[in-house]
Image (cartoon, rainbow, N blue to C red):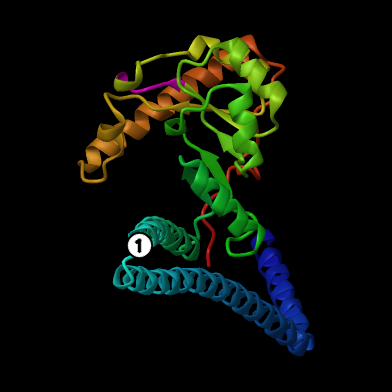
Amino acid sequence: MFKTLSTLIAGVNARSEDRVRDAFAIELIDQKIREAEAGIKAAKATLASLIQRQRSEERQKQNLDTRIKDMTKRAEQAIENDRDDMATEAAHAIAQMENELAIRRETLARLDQKTVRLRSSIEAGHRGFLVYDEGVLFILNKMRAEGLVPPETIFKFSVFGGYCSAAGAKVIESMGANSMNPISDVSLPILGAIRRAVGLTLDVYIIIVDSFGGMFRAYETPEIARIASPCYFKFEPGTSEGDIYKPWVTEDFHRNLIREKVKLASIVSEIMERHAPGIKASAQRPDDLVLPVVV
């Protein structure tokens, strides 16, 4: 009897939902069209902004090329008129401009590679990126501010950047970092100083690979959380970064590494429950721990 009633209720609900969809079908379609148009407009605006930046850079390169050609002609005329002094000055100016042009081309090429990879990742749905160069962080933050990168994208500054002081944390926060990874042996007083200086999230190593010192700080986690929150505990057991992150190892290696990380996380969770019951853990999928989205 109960099963029959459940079936009837489900049927009534389904018919009600169908009637609502039928009644508001035009409105739903109109809303989808508006959303699609808004997305197209945003994409066009982003593309227009990117093209404008590329044209600006191209104009600067062309300007340098023109100046070099003009200065070369002047140097040739000075040589013809036996003005070695003017020819020497022109040669120095040409050398400086050529050096500037070479540096500009090389820098633009490197940045273009990085931004292309970033845009490809964003198109794949990634919204969190690890950054280890201050210049790249500055540019990515500008791109995010100008709409070239989705506004919800998060930039974490890597431990390979080497920052582990309150002043350093302040610098990268001003450049747009949303979180930072201090070096693995950071002391509690330094963590406290960083926390007082900045509001960004800290990712603190609890265990680190042997090549980075092999520290294991599980029993410090209650005090780390008290001093450094908001923070995340980071687990990287193994011999080296190269060993645990290279993609061409066996599936068994990856499975065992994941099991080891889960085991360590459970140990730390138990320590926190016993020795720091008043410290609250974040809920699943917090806003500052972005996951890939469907695009």
Compare residues 235 and 146 and report the one nearer the observer: 146
Q: Which residue is drawn at 37% across and 55% down?
A: 92
Judged from the image, the secondary structure of the residue bearing numbered disc 1 is helix
Instruction: Give left or right: position of 206 versus 21.
Output: left
Task: Give the residue at x 64% y 76%.
Answer: 45
Q: Does the magenta stretch include residue 253?
A: no
Q: Residue 284 appears at what percent x and percent y?
A: 61, 40
Q: Decide: is 258 above or below 194.
A: below
Q: Outermost residue toward the front? A: 82
Q: How many marks?
A: 1
Q: Give the residue type at disc 1.
A: Ala
Picture quarter containing residue 232? top right
Residue drawn where x is 65% and y is 75% of the image? 42
Residue at 61%, 29% (x, y): give it. Answer: 169
Q: In the rendering, at what x and y percent does residue 46 appear?
A: 60, 72
Quarter of the image with the N terminus is: bottom right
Q: Where is residue 85 in the image (x, y as percent from the top left)?
A: 37, 57
In the picture shown, does residue 26 fall above or below 104? below
Quarter holding residue 87: bottom left
Which residues lie in the magenta part? 206-210
In the rendered image, which quarter is residue 37 located in? bottom right
The residue under label 1 is 87
Count residues near mark 1 (Cα–Cα under 10 Å), then give few for <14, some for 14-19, many for 20+. many
Residue 237 vs residue 63, the one in the foreground: 63
Residue 245 versus residue 197 in the image, above or below: below
Q: Which residue lies furthest to the bottom in this view?
A: 26
Nearer to me, 84 or 47: 84
- Counting from the top left corner in percent of width and height, residue 118 is at 46, 58
Can you say whether 79 is above or below 180 in the image? below
